[in-house]
Amino acid sequence: MQLKWYKLVDVDYDIDEVLVWARKLQLSEQGTNISNNSSANGYLGDNQQYWTGEFPQKQFDYFNSIIPLDGTFKGIKTSCNLWEYQSHSKLLPHIHTQEKEIGGLLIVPLIGKFKTSLFENDKIIDSVEYSPGKIFFLKGKEFLHGGETVDGYRLNVSLHIHKDVDLDLYI
């Protein structure tokens, strides 16, 4: 039986505009380093940090046409998080049980390849790799998952899927 836990979608958008936006966000303020208290999901691993900001509207609208997004999450228009992972960073296994305000996360890779794995009893039971040119979402509230950079450095955006979305209809 094949598990239906994620979806990859090929996308065609102005990634250069998003990369410029991302760099400006990184330069505008210090990123938040991951610690035990900085994530709703607990400690997620070393060598990663994030910024919160407003994603470019045109690209937000494009991704929102693929899966409904929360356009005003926590009062921030086109709210998103920009995540940076240094070489050989690992995203520790976690499940999004505390994220009641969203339906899930839509991951938009900007730089680098990443492998997300599904875990059962500390054992990887399935994995998928993705990179820029695709978007990725998974049933993060249902499945224990983690990941790691494949080519070294990784930069991605996470957008908030609307809390009323039934991911089974999209995966």
Image (spheres, rainbow, N blue to C red):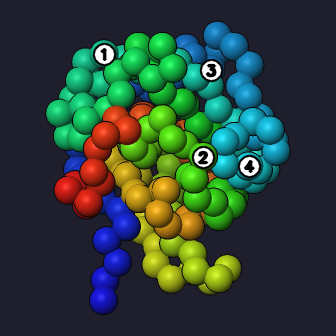
The kind of residue tagged 2 is Gln
For residue 129, above or below residue 99: below
Image position of 101 with respect to 79: above or below? below
- Quadrant location of the C terminus in the rendered image: bottom left
Mark 3 / mark 2, whichever is N-terminal: 3
- Residue named by callout 1: 57
**For discs 4 and 3, the disc positioned in front in the rendered view:** 4
| Disc 3 from disc 2: Cα separation | 27 Å
Q: Distance between the residues labelled 4 and 3?
A: 23 Å
Residue 47: percent from the left, percent from the top?
76, 46
Give the amino acid type for the residue marked by disc 1 in the picture: Gln
Q: For residue 78, which quarter of the picture?
A: top left
Q: Which of marks 3 and 2 is in front?
A: 2
Q: Can residue 49 be seen in this view?
A: yes
Q: Return the x and y of residue 94 as percentages of the image width and height.
A: 63, 60
Location of mark 4 (residue): 42
> Residue 166 appears at what percent x and percent y?
27, 51
Marks 1 and 2, how far apart in space?
27 Å
Amino acid found under the numbered disc labelled 4 = Gly
* Sequence-wise first label, 1 or 2: 1
Which residue carries the number 3 mark? 26
- Amino acid type, residue under disc 3 in the picture: Gln
Comparing 26 with 57, the one in front is: 57
Estimate how packed mark 4 is, as few (under 14), some (14 to 19) or many (20 or more) residues with alpha carbons within 10 Å: some
Q: Which one is nearer the viewer's eye here, 142 or 123?
A: 142
